[in-house]
Image (cartoon, rainbow, N blue to C red):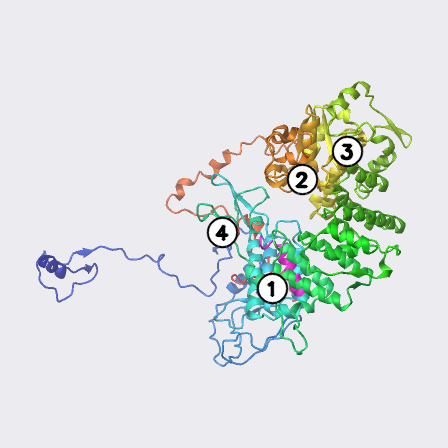
Amino acid sequence: MRRLFRTTRALWMRFDKENPPNESPTNDAKDSAPPVRFTPLTETMKPKAVSLDFTPFPLPKYDTALGFGPVRLTNIPDIEKTRERMRQPPAPRPNPPRTLVEVAPPVEEGFLQPADLFDDGLAAPRRPIPSAPDAGLDLQGYEVAPRFPAVDRLECRRSVGDLLAQFANRPQREARTATVWDFASSLPRRSNADLTRMFYELGGLFTPHGRGLQFPMIKVVKYGRPYFVSSSLLQAFWGLLEAATETFTLEQPERLCQSPPLFLQLLHFLALVKVFEPNLWFSPNPTMIQNRADYSHPRGVNRSVSHQRTGEDLFDYMMSLLLMVDEPQLPNNDRGSSFLDRFSFEQLLDLLGGLAAVMPDGRPEGKVVNAILQNLIKRWENQHNEVRSLDEVRNLERLYLILNLMNIKCNGILCALLEGGGENEEEKLMKSLGRCAFPAISLRLHPSLGQTNSDAVRGPDFFASVSREKSAEVLRRAVVELRRSLLFAHKTQNKALLLSLAESGMELLMVLPDKDEAVRVARAEGLDHLLLENIPGLEIVKERIQLEEGERIPDVVENLHDLQPFLSKADLEYSPRYLTQYQGKFVHPIRTLLSDLIFVNSIDNVLLLHSSIVEKSVSPLISTIHQRGRSGKDLLLITTSCLRALEVELRYSEGEKRHNFYKRALEAIGYELEQGRAILVPFTEELLLHDARTYCDEDLILWTLAAFFARELPLVKVLTLISRTSLASRPYHYLKGEHSPLSAGEEDLYRQNVPLLQALRSKELRAVTRSAVVQAPVRDRPTAMFYRVNPSRRRFLYRRDKALFDKYHVVARNISPGFSQGALASDLRGLGFYTPDHPQVPYTPLPRILQKHLSA
């Protein structure tokens, strides 16, 4: 131990190029200091002294021979500014002034001027902006931050109209990202009216049935299963939500209390971006299982995804505002005024709808809903529980629809809308309805709004919501009201009301317990051709269905649940109608499923059409019609629900490209129906085929028909033309409800007394139904240029310089410096936008620069 200490104490080191110290202990070779060899740093490893005309990152590297490099864009403002600086002799940067003078810049219209923008607890005046090399530059709506030396950031002072015009006119991802970041950075300075308009316009980017903040994503196939990376627009909207949370909950918590329209618009914006369903943001289609943002593994924490909680604090604060009640000002008031008293009746309905839409299951918190309903009851009590105008009746119908969507029963509102007609009838109706969770209230209509007034009819909201009732008495009275409303719409020739009543009447007639009564009402009101009224491309089909209605459905179809005896007997007597006369011409009759049942039974394959097949391209439908429609062995089957879904997408789809898809699809379907090569299932036949008391949309009708063919026409092979990304493509996974209980057995498909929709979970339906694999789409042959080129050869051309970069790996050496991914397509320099972390010189159009030169 002593020897080790002695050697350690005697050991000392010296560097080369330095003399040993004078107090060296001895000159012995053993005790002399060993040399430590080192290499001094080269000049490239040391920090450089940058000149005043140094070119920062967004520009390419400056070279004396090439200038700024092979830049293919012209009129890039920062390059021009740098060239202008380089022509002039460099001037020394002046020091900031030492005197602090309070400068109050002018505030643009629409901005708020707070008393002190930076409240640090000190009354510090605003500092002037130190002069910079670009101090004389016109920033065009941006200004340097008031604390410039410490905070090097530009502040957006542009108006809301200017930013919204940029958002609409420049739909590129980078430009819209910059606009949203501008909104996020200037939220505290905007007025309430501007914020309401901003959230309304930004919400127009999303659809109610959309996928929220899911923007076009990059598919990464680097590893086994591909995953998707979201774009920068998602980060910008995240920043907007975080800025709204910070502004409305911490910085200015009184803003939402002052403006109910702003409160409502913010709530609807949260619902449109699906703030509580982040899994939709990261999944390109609803059937994907990767990129789940709300999933945790049962054996532990799932580390491959992140739980997004954006907007939760803001929503909780908004809910606390709705529950806030002030102290009573007068002693006789048992309850003080609440925040809900500032809303009108229509705004309260919008509030209920927004609360139902923002939650994933459509059921908001019970305390908040109860507070809103108590406020409504207090308002009704002030007018003696009487509804006095048609506008109030329409609001009452809308309230009844919203409550039904939340699964909240209200017998008082239903009895008022159905008009009991006497004490005995009222008691009978209330007894059939049973108990409800809504607070007991007895509303009544004004006598002028009774059945004696022909204008006082129920609207489509009422019939769409009353179809969820189970009481036979309620449904009977609702059918009477439906026929009154249809008669009123025919008399007034209100086409919009007529079509909406027909659509909501579909839902009501579907849930009737007596299918024969439902079919009788549908035929009497002419719903078969009325539902095809407004669909483009089917005008001739609608007229011919109306003309051929008497001879279409025969009386031989008595029992749809046991068709084999009828088919075996009628097959010998079957004489098909090949031609019929229309406008002086002999044409093929419009084929429907039940009128041509024997012909359908002789077909090999039936292709059931779903509207999702046209979502990305119309080629699968055209290929099916071209390749299989003329074979004589295959038949295309189209339901009325599918046509209605296609028409809705045609009316309300975003983008001209998708609009043309649905327009071409409806034209092709109409032509095939006119030629007799496709089968139509009118609404009356949907009523006959579907399970009674069960509402069916397009998805459920398609699988009802699939089960019908598998049970009654087993020799016909069923193919479904449906997109793989649609939820209806996997009914045993996604179509869960009253019609498909978990207790369904494997033999339910072949039991006559079991409803057809209950067979969705049986293995037999999966076995007998196939998803049609459409062959190569019918297209023009590819261009001759670059044809027959092996794409794998390109890799070797790209990698022939691999040996040159074995020591220093250059990242993306094939992309021009200063560009984002995608090179010239995603140029970040000339767009002229501002982000808080990367302020840039604004973009100046070429005509404005030429005008300045000409004027000079």
Q: Amino acid at mark 4?
A: Ser
Mark 1 against mark 3, which lies toward the viewer? 1
Rendered-image quadrant of the C terminus = bottom right
What is the three-letter code of the residue carrying label 3? Leu
- Secondary structure, mark 3, is strand
- Mark 2 or mark 3: which comes first in sequence? 2
Q: Which residue is mark 1?
A: 318
Q: Is residue 829 visible?
A: no
Quarter containing the N terminus: bottom left
Left or right side of 581 for 220: left
The kind of residue tagged 1 is Met
Instruction: Give how far apart the Cα atoms at labels 1 and 3 are.
Output: 50 Å
Magenta-colored stretch includes residue 269: yes
Q: Nearer the viewer, residue 290 or 789?
A: 290
Which label's residue is closer to the chain start, 2 or 1?
A: 1
Q: Nearer the N terminus, badge 4 or badge 1?
A: 4
From which residue to which does the magenta span run?
Answer: 261-276
Residue tagged by mark 2?
A: 612
Q: Residue at x 40, y 44 (%)?
A: 805
- Residue behind mark 3: 680
Q: Position of residue 519 (x, y in %)?
A: 80, 38
Position above or below: 400 against 22: above
Q: Residues within 10 Å of mark 4 (few under 14, many from 20)?
A: some
Judging by the rendered image, the residue that carries numbered circle 4 is: 306
| Mark earlier in primary sequence (1, 3) | 1
Name which of mark 2 and mark 4 comes first in the sequence: 4
Label located before the other in sequence (4 or 3): 4
197 on left or right of 526: left
The percent coordinates of residue 659 (x first, y second) are: 72, 44
Is mark 1 in CB contact (under 8 Å) with mark 3?
no
Q: How crowded is the residue under tag 1: few (<14 C-alpha within 10 Å), some, or many (20+)?
A: some
Res. 116 in view: yes
